[in-house]
Image (cartoon, helix red, strand yellow):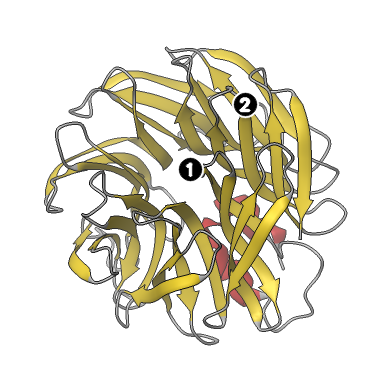
Amino acid sequence: MNRLIFLKVAFAFTLIVSLNSCKDDPIPEEYLRSGNSVALTSDGNLIIAGYNTGAGGYDANLILANSLTGDTIWSKSFATSYVDAFYNAKKANKGGYIATGFSNRALGASPGTIVVITDNAGKLVQSAVYGGSNSSQGFYVLPHSNSDSGYLVTGWIQKTTRADRDIYLLKLNNDGSVKWEKTYGPAGKYSSDTTFDAAYSMAAAPGGGYYLTGSLKGYSTGGGRIFLMKVSSKGDSLWTKTYGYGIGFSVTTTQDGNVAIGGTSQATSNSEITILKTDTAGNIIWNKIYSQPGLEYGSTLIQTIDGGYAITGITNSKGSGNDDVYLIKTNQTGDLQWDNYFGGSNVDQGFGLVQNSNQEFFITGMSNSDGSYIFLNKTDNAGKQIWVKYIK
């Protein structure tokens, strides 16, 4: 598998391209596993969504880990097809967990958005693939604030290989049936190329509706813009703001009722981690870029208990390897307080981040140092590593 694919796109979010490219080749002991998101469970442990290898290929994977020790409580694979992966998981409305990602049903087939619900022990309760015969992937799942009102799933959808790739938003009932589905995206201005739009994260908006972020108006050669979109509770687009070249990978509402986006700025020749804060109408309050001499990529952003922000991702400017897991902590106005990096001599990348009530951080991602592993670590509130686990 070509690791340059991962460096160009930064994340496992284009996993299907890379996994399919090496499916029929001898599989090296790298890029076989990843944790793409991590969330706290009701009892304070950790649910990790990602992928692993199985007898039939690449399987979507959920892991429940002990937050005190990092030890795996259980690990469940969901091998529904040729290549499967989860990008995001949350607690389900009726107990257990819900995860979304993609299912690629056969060699050369189009991926479909998969949503899986399990019980508390990881046993499958229901599973479905959405998007029909179109290519699609789900990157983020949001349980509705009213537990009787289902879920929202967002990502992208593409009706044909020559069609534009649009933002995809699904509203599901608790039983997995579709309540409504929406697509959004401007038409491309170049007849020789298709427009690539995708939403990677969303958050419930105060007063109703939802915020989506991702990349808008990109092309196969790159050039997408970070965007913030507000949609109504019925999925109708209300407004969209763009903020320069790059990718918004994470959006959250803030303690003071505004909005924060974390991701990657590509405004210069380097890729740099960025955090920007807007008001509820999408107007910028402040915009911070955390420049380094090399390439950095931002993934999950959270607001921390002290009112500041933390974002994880990738650095190749710091650390001991080609890439290292990166963690940045800022104050309330986005000014850097500290940063730290983790990893070995090869490629290590951070994708998911969560903080517990003790203000400790948990990061998940991938490690290709001395093998291929799901990366999981725990740090204190100053970013000092308490433990690290490399999970197969």
Determine whether 11 is above or below 170 in the image.
Answer: above
> Which one is in front, 143 or 256?
143
* Labels 1 & 2 near each other (Cβ < 8 A): no
The answer to whether residue 155 is left or right of residue 280 is right
Q: Quadrant of the N terminus?
A: bottom right
Residue displayed at 28% across by 69% down: 175
Q: Position of residue 342 (x, y in %)?
A: 75, 35
Badge 2 marks a residue whose secondary structure is: loop
Badge 1 or badge 2: first in the primary sequence: 1
The answer to whether residue 176 is left or right of residue 332 is left
Q: Position of residue 328 (x, y in %)?
A: 59, 25
Residue displayed at 32% across by 58% down: 153
Q: To which quarter of the image does residue 246 belong?
A: top left
Crowding at dot 2, Cα within 10 Å, few <14 / some 14-19 / many 20+, comes out as: some
Q: Position of residue 293 (x, y in %)?
A: 67, 27
Task: Inspect the image, locate mark 2, and give the three-letter code of the amino acid beneath it.
Answer: Glu
The answer to whether residue 348 is left or right of residue 190 is right
Q: Which residue is mark 2?
A: 360
Whether residue 313 is visible, yes or no, is yes
Crowding at dot 1, Cα within 10 Å, few <14 / some 14-19 / many 20+, comes out as: few
Q: Which residue is mark 1?
A: 42
Task: Inspect the image, locate mark 1, and give the three-letter code of the amino acid beneath it.
Answer: Ser
The answer to whether residue 130 is left or right of residue 101 is left
Badge 1 marks a residue whose secondary structure is: loop
> Which one is in front, 333 or 118?
118
Q: Quadrant of the C terminus?
A: bottom right
